[in-house]
Image: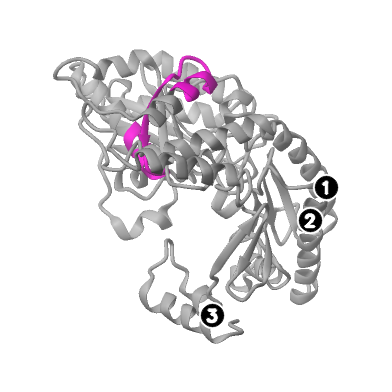
Amino acid sequence: MAQNREAEELIEAAKKYVWTNLSEYSDIEKEPKIFVKGAGCYLVDVNGKRYLDTFASLLTTISGHHRPEIAEAVQKQMAQLEFFPNYHDCYTVPVIKLAEKLAQLAPGDLSVSYFVNDGSEACESAIKMAKQYFWQRGESSRNKIIGRRYSYHGATLGALSATGLPDFAEPFHPLVPGFTHAMSTWCYHCELDLEPSSCGLACLKNMEQVILGEKPETVAAIIIDPIPGSNIGYPIPPDGYLQGLRELCDKYGIFLIFDEIQVGFGKTGKLFACENWDVTPDFMCLAKGFTGGYLPMGAVLTTPGIADEFRRPGKDFRHGFTFSGHPTVAAAVLAHIEIIERENLVERAAAMGKYLKERLEQFYKYPIVGDIRGMGMILAIELVADRKTKAPLDPKLNVGTWIRDYCWEHGMILRNNGEILVIAPAFTMTEEEADKMLGLMEQAISGAIEQFEF
């Protein structure tokens, strides 16, 4: 807790005047956390205590904290033109250059960028693009969106309607009509209690049945995260699922939207997660690590064929945000991409991810470790009461939270979603830092077994 008067005053002001995102007031009352400095994989709080950041500031600072090159790029752009909206018939140079760069990097024929401010706006925009595309082509009956259970797509009402996590949506009903959900690819907790080796891709068959049940001619798009995010701990889709999903969309004339906000931009060891399966969507949503966390921006990438539908008189996209395509932010993102390429950070993420996964496999010696999953630098441990039956731990014990708090007290930020421990550190993490992270996680798990007498 606070060790000096200035820190105490800041904490009181924070609790009184600031409403945090996804507030957790039990944690705020326990110990508000105020950070004042960052460098590499570390953060320093208001009391001067140093913490190893193992979740890259909510999956954003993938190149580490405090990169002077990005600050210099921002200052240079602000000295020329700090802001003018990417609106109507107006462009700025950094935005044009960023769009050109993304066209070079993106898979397939994804080469047109629509810029927004964050991931929720990216998913919201892609959904609206798909709907308007069919509407103005005389297919207004194609207005439904299919998502998947257990996937998160954002906080705006449209993105939330696509989200398959009821706890996020319950206070905001009724949601936007026309959204429905199919099975997830969370194989460890298969909804049909099947095994991946023998299920015959039941989740893909379920998706087709949902399409047929809604009637294909009423469906505009399917939106999925190629690898579901941290809420369920990055379950990898079974082989053939994404390829089969692409085939289904082509078969029924439905757009495929990939939400790569959490899992894209190098986190899997490929620049884009979908490249691991050689599948290209019609729309790809980016944010979080895309900017390195330095300034807010997201993007929707699509094909010239889709974008051209909106590039005709009277066919303009009826949607936008004031600060979308901010030139100063675009300059920061360009500088960030330059760092990624110069330092081979995607390749580094692949190598470090392999090292982390091999080390994590040793955690199976602890009886409460039920599943270890993920790929690249996005990895998770799911804790259970019984590994064989997958019986969950008693939620009243809050074992995952106890482990998180243990790590915090020992100078490390660890993310947990209930009994799922997730790590997604910066790609710049050294082997020494990785060993420190894994060592402290192991201490915490061992400590929890002793604390709760498992």
Q: Secondary structure at mark 3?
A: helix
Q: Secondary structure at mark 2?
A: helix
Q: At which x and y percent is residue 108?
A: 51, 15
- In this image, 325 relative to 262: left or right? left
- In this image, 271 relative to 370: left or right? left
- Disc marking residue 323: none
- Determine if the magenta segment contains residue 140: no
Residue drawn at the location 26% of the way across and 16% of the way down:
309
Residue situated furthest left in the rendering: 314
- Disc marking residue 438: 2
User: Mark 2 or mark 3, which is nearer the start of the sequence?
Assistant: 3
Depth check, front residue: 412 or 278:
412
Q: Does residue 298 lie above or below 313 as drawn?
A: below
Dots 1, 3 in contact, CB < 8 A: no
Name the residue type under label 2: Leu
Q: At which x and y percent is residue 133?
A: 26, 22
Name the residue carrying label 3: 7
3D distance between C-alphas at marks 1 and 3: 38 Å
Depth check, front residue: 235 or 294:
294
Dots 3, 2 in contact, CB < 8 A: no
Residue drawn at the location 77% of the way across and 43% of the way down:
357
Name the residue type under label 1: Arg
Q: Does residue 282 lie above or below 226 as drawn?
A: above
Q: Does residue 181 lie above or below 142 as drawn?
A: below
Dots 2, 1 in contact, CB < 8 A: yes
Quadrant assignment for the N terminus: bottom right
Name the residue carrying label 1: 359
